[in-house]
Amino acid sequence: MNPILQRSWLWLVIIVLCAGGCTRIFENDHDAQARKALQDLIVIQDQFHKENNRYAKNLTEIQKYNLKYHNGIVYLEIESAGKDKYRAISLPAESITARVFAYDTSHGGYYEMDEEEVAQYVLGALNHIRQEKREKKAADYLSIGMVVCLFWFGMRMLIRYKDSRTGWVWWPYFLCLAPLALAMVTLNHMGITVALSTELAIVMSTGLGVSVLCLILAGIGLTKIPAKGEHQILQAIAICTILISLFSGAVVTKSYFLYSKPKVNTLYFK
């Protein structure tokens, strides 16, 4: 197989695998608060154990440590505790994602429950939540599939159209597919309930920066296309890059400013 095609397959695999991480990047605000509340409790329990040579059996015992969380949004409970072990769980009071967090010293510490264990804590709407998750995952793979098709098309054209003077056209095209993938999953996942974490802000800012860079490079590439010969493909690739970059940048920018306003239910989430 052509070495370029071999490298392209590697990139395709990487792009598809990245689709599975969308749930963690676009994290629901209530899930983020539940996870943070449990992490704060873990720190307090360690301090309590140092002072009392045992773990606290309930939240009342650790009131002096000023554990802050919105108890109307987050359900936090110490299920059991002893001298050398304890188990605590945390989840949104009205979960819409079926994510439950736990800390159990007999199970290696902090972990996120799998679907079988989640069923014990999330009732009623669990099947609906699972269906929504499947639909979002399907939308993610369709979006990534479209990006993969554009990537494959570009590789095929690049192999057929070898010219050392056309790098200003091809590199922006392949580079702009990354922010395009981000824009697609942003449309699928971003919403008023998503926590705009530092990680998500960095990802979105990077995507916007790459889109602007591709827009500039594609514009320069148009001016560098040789005047003589048949270069309709190069012109089409450059124009396509410009359109993709404009779309990606617009989606990320609008989503950021639309959903970056502080939420009233995050007063206790610091």
Image (cartoon, rainbow, N blue to C red):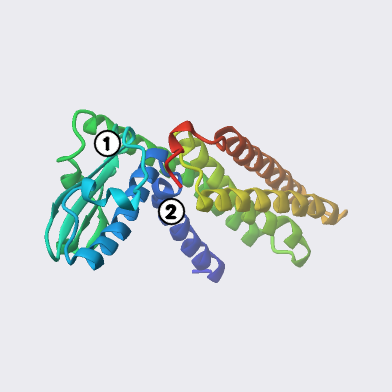
Between 217 and 256, the one lying in front of the other is 256
Q: Residue at x 66, y 53 (%)?
A: 210
Q: Is residue 116 left or right of residue 184?
A: left
Q: Secondary structure at mark 1?
A: helix
Q: Position of residue 211 (x, y in %)?
A: 67, 49
Instruction: Inspect this view and state whether residue 38 appears.
Output: no
Q: Residue at x 75, y 59 (%)?
A: 168
Q: Residues within 10 Å of mark 1 (few under 14, many from 20)?
A: some
Label 2: which residue? Answer: 16
Whichever of callouts 2 and 1 sits on the residue coming sooner in the sequence is 2
Q: Position of residue 234 (x, y in %)?
A: 74, 51
Q: Secondary structure at mark 2?
A: helix
Label 1: which residue? Answer: 130
Between 24 and 168, the one lying in front of the other is 24
Instruction: Inspect this view and state whether residue 255 appears.
Output: yes
Residue type at mark 1: give it. Arg
The image shows residue 254, relative to residue 233, as above or below, that is: above
Q: Residue furthest right?
A: 227
Q: Position of residue 85 (x, y in %)?
A: 15, 62
Q: Residue furthest bottom?
A: 3
Q: CA distance from mark 2 to mark 1?
A: 21 Å
Q: Is residue 118 left or right of residue 159?
A: left
Q: Residues within 10 Å of mark 2 (few under 14, many from 20)?
A: some
Between 170 and 64, the one lying in front of the other is 64
Q: Is residue 113 left or right of residue 179?
A: left
